[in-house]
Image (tube, rainbow, N blue to C red):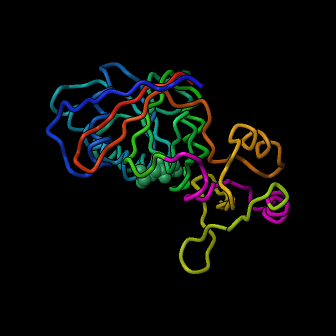
Amino acid sequence: MTNPTTFEVCEEKPVANPKEAAGRQAAELVESGMRVGLGTGSTVAFTLARLAERVASEGLEVHGVPTSIDTQTRAVELGIPLMTLAEVERLDLTIDGADEIDAAFQMIKGGGGALLREKVVASISERVAIVVGRDKVVERLGLSFLLPVEVVPFALPTVSRELRGIGCEPVLRLDGPSEPFHTDNGNRIFDCRFPDGIADAPTLERELACVPGIVESGLFIGLAHTALIGADDGSVSVTHHRP
Ligand code: 5RP
């Protein structure tokens, strides 16, 4: 893995919320005419708000492809023009959050349950920028955040056994006290606990992709180019990496 280069960028007045600082800063990467993948989560919500400000104040011409129904709803409310995957082959840029990111830009995503659409959108993007607070930066994935795995409902029992065989403990994500969580695609999520974390994320991603019934895992490997990492003082460090 090449060593990422880090430099400080803070063009706006610093804001003391790390997510807000990173999220807003990422919106400055968008140029007029771009087609942009719009990620999901509380950090990207700040990106969407800033993007909408730029559309209104600068006349920025942008079309977004949302990665979840939640993001779609927010974008429509904010007046950000949207398009579908049927209307676009490639995206110029995607801005998304992450639950964990390591020095090689390997990530766990899917805390908000949007991992499948997020990975599809990232996969057709020329550039992917990740917005996180510094608390999301880890040395080893999977030690503090469970790995989300999206599963078709029919295959929950078989996938559960396969996941245990792979060495993790799958926990069915719930929506409230007893109802299973439904993804935007009508699937379920196992949040997987790896007792010693994830030593070899690329191998695990490939292993999971081979299990019938698993639609997608929250391991994002080789997809991110840029990380905007917000600190508690409101500064944002921008790190680039060649996937
Ligand atoms: C949703 C995701 C989010 O990007 C991730 O959970 C980070 O969310 P937040 O910005 O709210 O911390 O992967 O599926």
Q: Position of residue 101 (x, y in %)?
A: 51, 43
Quarter the C terminus occupies: top right
Asked if residue 157 lies in the magenta stretch, the reply is: yes
Residue 60 in which image quadrant:
top left
Q: Position of residue 61 (x, y in %)?
A: 29, 24
Give the left or right position of residue 18, taking residue 126 as reference: left
Vertical comparison of 77 with 1: above or below: below
Residue plotted at (42% across, 24% down)? 5
Res. 181 in view: yes
Vertical comparison of 81 with 197: above or below: above
Give the left or right position of residue 98, taking residue 238 as reference: right
Nearer to us in this view, 159 or 21: 21
Residue 190 in which image quadrant:
bottom right
Residue plotted at (60% across, 66% down)? 181
Give the left or right position of residue 165, taking residue 233 as reference: right
What span is in magenta? 138-163
Q: Position of residue 34 (x, y in %)?
A: 38, 21
- Count the numbered circles shown: 0
Q: Position of residue 78 (x, y in %)?
A: 28, 44
Quarter the N terminus occupies: top right
Asked if residue 233 lies in the magenta stretch, the reply is: no
Nearer to us in this view, 215 or 219: 219
Give the left or right position of residue 214, taking residue 105 as reference: right
